[in-house]
Amino acid sequence: MNKLDICKQTRKVASESLYKTLEILLNSKKPISESILRDRWLLEMRKYKSISQDGWYIPPPHGMGVLFATEDDIKRLNFTSIRPQEFWPRDDIYLDREKGIMMLYFSPVDIKSGIIGDFEMTLYFGKNKLLINQIKTSLKIISKTFKFVDVGLKFSDIAKFMDNLLMKNHLINSVYSISDPLNNNFGHTIPYSYEDMTQDENKILRLEKKDWQTVCNMISKKRRFLNISEDLELQVPMAFTIEPRCKLNDEDKSPLISFHTVVLIKENGKKELLTNFDKIFKLARMDYALNL
């Protein structure tokens, strides 16, 4: 497989394993805690031998984020980052199947190439119209941005376009990143999708079983961010993420709604948006989120 195919397959593994996990848990009458979902998802992921045992975004443990809130109590989804321990999956917080909201994130790595396939989505099990509209708007912003993307554009052009879209929809981008100098971005490059790994980087990757944290740091520092000051131009081939973290301007009343997608720009200049959400939306009875 070429680099973009590897990215596509790695992300698909994350979404397919999540679907299998949720299908079993949601069809069971047993309570579902954050840690139960995290552990079951991780177990399913580890069946794929081409993928790293843990994700690259550590902490949280295993490079996974699973957070539950409700439409009446959204504070669990008002995080700035899932790195602090208070936002790691807990075994005493359970899904509300009538009013619940969940944020799901995993950061798998293809172990041969070092190419990542990050996956993140928000699921909502209630009927609050304001929340449903926030979810639909977040997805529409991603769709409109993808249509705007073209070879030769700078990352800063795309970031400014997204800034404008959020303002028009009375949303803010609630993001915190220790790696981004501006600490305000809408995504980042997929390392090694458009450049080759150096000999030193390859040596680090080969030692992943002995020193995974060094591999994680290497991947993290290799990213370039989709922000208003980044002059990197879109080229072929290339993969990068579009991942706005959308909140209403009235932050206290709005949970953070996050969807993490990947744009592939192929050798022939054609582009593809990887979402991998639809099967999971249907499972959660979120048909309103389809075909936006």
Image (tube, rainbow, N blue to C red):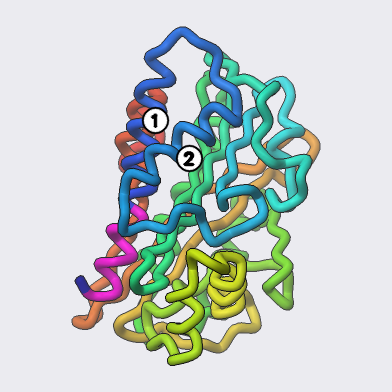
Which circle, 2 or 1, is nearer the viewer? 1
Residue 225 lies in quadrant: bottom right
Kindly tell me whether residue 130 is visible in this rendering: no
**Picture coordinates of residue 198 (x, y %)?**
44, 91
Q: Residue drawn 61% across and 56% down?
A: 166
Residue 238, compared with residue 48, is above or below; it is below
Residue most extreme to the front = 210
Residue 250, compared with residue 271, is above or below; it is above
- Disc 2 crowd rating (10 Å Cα; few below 14, some 14-19, many 20+) is some
Q: Amino acid at mark 1?
A: Thr
* Image quarter hosting the C terminus: top left
Residue 210 lies in quadrant: bottom right
**Picture coordinates of residue 25 (x, y %)?**
43, 20
* Boundaries of the magenta span: 2-11
Find disc 2 in the rendering and name its residue. 136
Find disc 1 in the rendering and name its residue. 21
> Looking at the rendered structure, which numbered label has been put on residue 279?
none
Q: Residue drawn 57% across and 38% down?
A: 103
- Disc 1 crowd rating (10 Å Cα; few below 14, some 14-19, many 20+) is many
Q: Amino acid at mark 2?
A: Lys
